[in-house]
Image: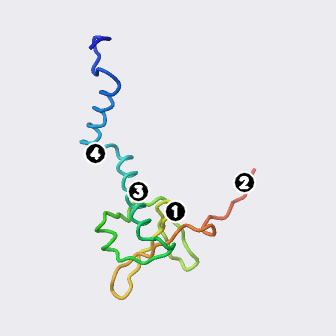
């Protein structure tokens, strides 16, 4: 190796490859773990919600790795039901006929919060 005496890597590629391996084996940062679970949840919800609204048994989603504790925002309807969203895909847990199910929805324009006026 040429360069400084305390040089650890032969080039940028070697440094990048080493950092990738370290991150891969240690599981990464908390941010990466959360981001990874959000992406997984979104992909699962997207796969089951082709028409804009669907019902799926909870064990089906959980078996694929869905974690309902990871979501980006929520929306409360007029009935008081709170839909949790992973980006544009929402879900609501319900118990129907003794079976836990998720109602899956897509984010709609009417779900936006009302604009508030700024006070001087």
Which mark identifies residue 88? Answer: 1
Residue 99 circle label? none
Query: In the rendered structure, are the residues bearing label 3 and label 4 in contact, judged by CB atoms less than 8 Å apart?
Result: no
Q: Is residue 89 above or below residue 120?
A: below
Is the residue marked by circle 3 packed among few (<14), some (14-19), or many (20+) residues within 10 Å? many
- Work out how far the residue at label 3 is from the one at label 4, CA to CA, in angstroms: 16 Å
Which residue lies most toward the left here? Answer: 25
Q: Label 3, on which residue?
A: 38
Kindly state the secondary structure of the residue where label 3 is placed. helix
Point out the tag, 2 or 3, that comes first from the N-terminus.
3
Q: Residues within 10 Å of mark 1 (few under 14, many from 20)?
A: some
Q: Earlier in the sequence, mark 4 or mark 1?
A: 4
Q: Are marks 1 and 2 in contact (CB under 8 Å)?
A: no
- Where residue 4 sits, quadrant-wise, is top left
Q: At which x and y percent is residue 93?
A: 41, 75
Considering the numbered disc 4 on the image, is that residue within a helix, a strand or a loop? loop
Q: CA distance from mark 1 to mark 2?
A: 27 Å
């Amino acid at each position: 190796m040429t360069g400084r005496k305390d040089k650890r890597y032969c080039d940028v590629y070697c440094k990048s490859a080493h950092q990738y391996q370290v991150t891969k084996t240690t599981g990464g940062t908390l941010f990466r773990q959360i981001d990874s679970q959000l992406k997984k949840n979104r992909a699962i919800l997207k796969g089951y919600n082709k028409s804009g609204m669907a019902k799926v048994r909870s064990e089906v989603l959980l078996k694929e790795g869905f974690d309902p504790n990871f979501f980006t925002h929520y929306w409360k309807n007029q009935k008081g039901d709170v839909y949790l969203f992973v980006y544009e895909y929402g879900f609501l847990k319900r118990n129907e006929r003794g079976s836990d199910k998720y109602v899956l929805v897509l984010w709609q324009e009417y779900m936006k919060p009302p604009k508030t006026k700024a006070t001087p």
